[in-house]
């Protein structure tokens, strides 16, 4: 396999792998692997990079990713200095974990549809505390009871209609470990510094390239200009602040790394087709 990926070292005799992460901040790099992955964010928040898309993530969210879909959860700068530990549960399984024709059977037709959607990354909207408890309780079970509960979990996931596809297309093209490390290092630099001035020269230095070469490389690999990528992260964070705080638009603009509000407003309209003020009103009207 030419694309850089994360190799799992697990019990080859197990049908699926369950792992819990509790750490000051998430440390997994931007990566992909050969398994499907269910991820429950028990406690944490930050930015999720999925394919060539970006979104916010926070407590209680649930995701399903297909093999070959690059992804990474980055915590905001300073998260590890807070009193909150980053806590996630990860379940990984191969498509043929119950045989090569399992997903062709009539009884699992709805699950097959979900598996297909996972190629773009699936977020289950408001899965609820009951679902979270089922996932966390799975590791307490043994042998056939554990397998049965896992199959019931897959059935529950396939029955959820309220989902969101996270990436319209997996256009990120990595050709090896070097590409994977460069993209990861640049993503991490932007994720940790987007709230202040982002330097083109620093980003190029992180990638160990000259500025012009870096610009061409980043556009070729991500199908985006570097400035577009930075603005996406900043606007995504501004949406979170507009929805969850009472900070003024001016305060939010500066907190998201913009040096003036007029440029912030222009960028916001590009990505959200509305003004920051109107976006906040729409969100609050939905809540009430």
Image (cartoon, rainbow, N blue to C red):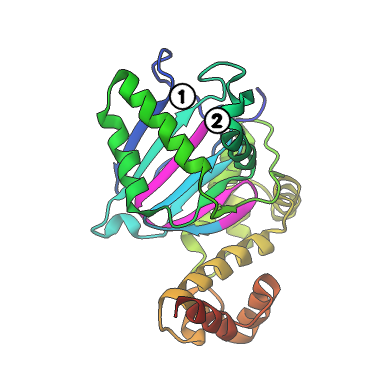
* Position of residue 225 in the picture relative to residue 160 (left or right): right
Magenta region includes residue 23: no
Q: Vertical placement of 51 versus 174: above or below?
A: below
Q: Which residues are magenta?
A: 36-54
- Mark 1 highlights which residue? 8
Magenta region includes residue 52: yes
Residue in the picture at 30% in, 49% down: 24
Most prominent secondary structure in the magenta stretch? Answer: strand
* Position of residue 122 in the picture relative to residue 126 (left or right): right
Residue in the picture at 54% in, 37% down: 31
Q: Residue furthest top?
A: 13
Q: Which mark is residue 33?
A: 2
Nearest the viewer among 248 and 4 is 248
Q: Quadrant of the N terminus?
A: top right
Q: Are marks 2 and 1 in contact (CB under 8 Å)?
A: yes
Q: Quadrant of the C terminus?
A: bottom left
Disc 1 element:
loop
Q: Position of residue 260 (x, y in %)?
A: 58, 84
Label 2 Cα crowd, 10 Å radius (few <14 / some 14-19 / many 20+) = many
Nearest the viewer among 60 and 264 is 60
Q: Position of residue 184 (x, y in %)?
A: 55, 44
Looking at the rendering, which quadrant does residue 148 occupy?
Answer: top left
Residue 25 seen in this snapshot: no
């Amino acid at each position: 396999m030419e694309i850089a990926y994360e190799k799992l070292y697990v019990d080859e005799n197990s049908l699926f792998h369950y792992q819990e992460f509790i750490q000051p901040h998430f440390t997994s790099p931007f990566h992909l692997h050969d398994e499907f992955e269910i991820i429950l964010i028990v406690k944490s928040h930050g930015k999720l990079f999925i394919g060539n898309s970006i979104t916010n993530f926070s407590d209680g969210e649930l995701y399903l990713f297909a093999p070959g879909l690059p992804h990474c959860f980055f915590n905001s700068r300073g998260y590890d200095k807070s009193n909150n530990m980053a806590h996630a549960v990860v379940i990984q399984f191969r498509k043929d974990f119950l045989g090569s024709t399992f997903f062709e059977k009539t009884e699992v037709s709805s699950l097959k549809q979900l598996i297909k959607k996972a190629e773009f990354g699936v977020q289950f909207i408001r899965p609820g505390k009951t679902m979270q408890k089922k996932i966390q309780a799975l590791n307490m079970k043994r042998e056939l009871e554990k397998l049965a509960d896992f199959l019931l979990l897959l059935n529950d996931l396939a029955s959820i209609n309220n989902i969101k596809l996270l990436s319209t297309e997996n256009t990120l093209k990595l050709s090896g470990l070097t590409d994977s490390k460069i993209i990861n290092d640049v993503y991490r630099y932007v994720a940790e510094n987007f709230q202040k001035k982002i330097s083109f020269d620093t980003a190029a230095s992180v990638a160990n390239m000259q500025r012009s070469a870096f610009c061409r490389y980043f556009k070729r690999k991500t199908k985006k200009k570097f400035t577009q990528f930075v603005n996406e992260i900043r606007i995504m964070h501004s949406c979170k602040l507009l929805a969850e705080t009472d900070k003024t638009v001016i305060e939010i603009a500066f907190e998201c790394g913009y040096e003036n509000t007029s440029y912030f407003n222009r960028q916001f309209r590009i990505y959200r087709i509305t003004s920051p003020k109107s976006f906040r009103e729409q969100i609050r009207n939905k809540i009430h």
